[in-house]
Amino acid sequence: MEMLPLLHGLNPEQLAAVTLPPQHALILAGAGSGKTRVLTTRIAWLIQTNQAGPHGILAVTFTNKAAKEMLTRLSSMLPINLRGMWIGTFHGLCNRLLRAHHREAALPQLFQILDQADQLSAIKRLVKSLDVDDEKYPPRELQHFINAQKEQGLRASAVEAWDDFTRRRIEIYEAYERQCQREGVVDFAELLLRSFELLTRNEILRRHYQERFRHILVDEFQDTNVLQYRWLKQLGGGGASIFAVGDDDQSIYGFRGAEVGNMRDFEREFKVAHVIRLEQNYRSHGNILDAANAIIKNNEARLGKNLWTDAGSGEPIRIFEATSDLDEARWIVEEIKALCRDGHARAEIALLYRSNAQSRVLEHALFSAALPYRVYGGLRFFERQEIKHALAYLRLIANPDDDTAFSRVVNFPTRGIGARSLEQLADVARTRGLSLHAAIAQLSGKAGTSLAAFAALIESLRQGTEGLPLPEVVDHVIEISGLSSHYRNEREGADRVANLDELVNASASFVAEEGSREPEEEGQSALASFLAHASLEAGEHQAGDSDDAVQLMTVHSAKGLEFNVVFISGLEEGLFPHENAILEEKGLEEERRLMYVAVTRARARLYLSFAQTRMLHGQTRYNVASRFVDEIPAALLKWLTPKIRNVFAASPNASYGGGPSPALPRKAGPASDSGLSIGQNVNHAKFGLGVIVNAEGSGSDTRVQVNFGHAGMKWLALAVAKLTPA
DNA sequence: TGGGAGTGCTTTTTT
DNA sequence: AGCACTCCCA
């Protein structure tokens, strides 16, 4: 018997994973080990060997991009129609489930989805109407609280009230639930929780889906939160096989509720017979992998895994110590220029940093050098102001009781409806238990007139678009609402007008795509699915000016990507690892995983850099090199600057070779009469080598703040502490 | 109603 | 420093 062509070229572990008999499986897939390939080949194999039909497969990812990628690869592997297959994000699939069973889920057919920003404004509105003290209960904090509860699977009634403060927050959570229900809107976490509850409560539906999906495949399993895991357990509870792929070493979203522990729990609770490890890396050269392995080895909480490659060790890792953030940026630009001269494509060069604030200096330097670049992580299409305005009008057509949408555009473009009128309206709505829109009819006087005119506008939009194809609906709404002319008259409005036009195009291509793919949603208003699409998929990040551009992004957004050349900048204690994370063990381990992710993005060449001083939040900070630099074996590193100032290495006496000494701003401060100055390296008997970052007081009262790296930031009295210049 | 001044925040981010 | 947000005045 011959092997299916689809299995050709898989290594033994990949093959074992792909062809596993129907049983629960945990695949530990290291960076660059062919994870997506295994996942898609597994699906193709199940179908080709008739173990499952497309109908019986559920595949879950975290991002729309990953879902799309999977679908694309699958359709090139299988010459069949994949329509019946459920591939998508957790949220997308839950949306699909809730749309199909909206009645059972107690939702209006055209329920709207609140994105993060919508949710926040809904909470702000609620806080105002409940007369909550927003100093004590900041809306942002409430939003976080509510989402955290939902992600634990907890309704307001189930949250434990341990103190008065929490009790009040629970009341607000409860009021928020009522408000959402009244308005017919759901937030992201609600999509998950609501569909989980639907399946819990409704045995018939539960069994239907449990019996339908015999194979459940999960991508990036290390990123699942508590609720997502329970959701999977429930769907798989009818004897399905769950095939979970993940990498605990790449879990970098703990800060927003991702639970790496789910991997261990899964292994235990589902009695996974043996975990398959994909450790052969097809991406990076040996030195890069060795560095990554050496770094991650310092983490305690690991399932354990060691990447290897047969690609040869390749080049050493280049490391540069800059005197300042500006100096660092300048050096990076010079290096990139040289790389481009050597024939490297700009798009194959990535510039990574820990936090977005770092991009400014880099962008400036790239811009000055006329190097095309593209920054990821900006405002996305569906998040733009003008787009959200247009969508709000569309939402009001679908559901005039959507108070969030109502509030957004009731006076935009301005039509003389001021804060006073809206307060009046909100009062009426509250006392009578009506939506803002419904409350208009109860209002008289001047406020009543202008608001009635707005209600009439919404009604005319609804009537004027009835039966029209979606793109024409969108176009009509943009024109008649006054948005279009408003932005045309605005000085800087040209881009916004263009974006509104683009929205019409987006709706047209949505219809074109959707019509060919979603037979199950027939009969449902195209408008509603378009609105859901807009919420669930915020759209491409801001397009770059040029296709062949240097790629700038945070380490987080680099996950899943790879480049021939990678720069990791700002490798400084306090920045990377971030100071907020250093204190707790878990935080530091997550930072280290982040570093691991960063390093493993590189195929052939990796640059590391750090700066002695950096401007942050309007203040100059004095830094020492990141501990992660020291976790890389010295033999793998090629220093482009003499190795000094590296507090973790025991060579404090190395001198700065050649050139002028680093241009540290040495202000004559209180510290100077002791022979010490800011920016100076010092030795301390207990804490070791550090750098002075701040000083206060004078004479015998002088205290200095010293960054000791490992030992942290300390304030020391000069009279007491024995500090010697290093 | 809109803009100017004052205030406060600032890790990472997808859905 | 830079940005978002609020508040107050013309």
Image (cartoon, coloured by chain):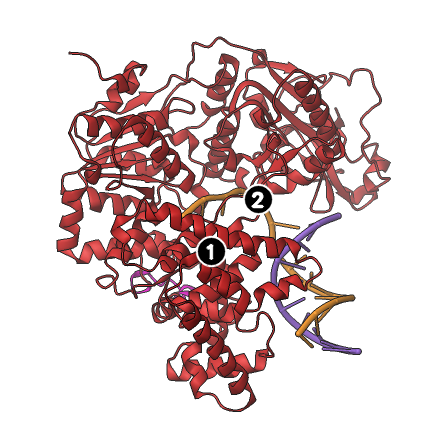
Chain colours: A red, B orange, C purple
Q: Quadrant location of residue A491?
A: bottom right
Q: Residue drawn 43% across and 31% down?
A: A250
Q: Which chain does the numbered disc 1 sit on?
A: A
Of discs 1 and 2, which sits in the foreground?
Answer: 2
Locate residue A469, reporting x and y percent: 40, 59
Chain part drawn in magenta:
A156-169
Q: Residue at image x 71%, y 33%?
A: A366
Does the image show residue A444? yes
Compared across the picture, whether A203 is left or right of A322 comes to left
Q: Nearer the viewer, residue A579 or A381?
A: A381
- What is the magenta segment's predominant secondary structure? helix
Determine the chain carrying the residue at label 2.
A
In which quadrant is the C terminus of chain A drawn? top right
Residue at which label 2 appears: A542
Secondary structure state at the residue bearing disc 1 = helix
Residue A511 horizontal/vertical position (percent): 39, 51
Identify the secondary structure beneath mark 2.
loop
Which amino acid, by three-letter code, is at mark 2?
Gln
> Mark number for residue A116?
1
Instruction: Based on the picture, tell me whether residue A214 belongs to the magenta stretch.
Output: no
| Both marks 1 and 2 on one chain | yes
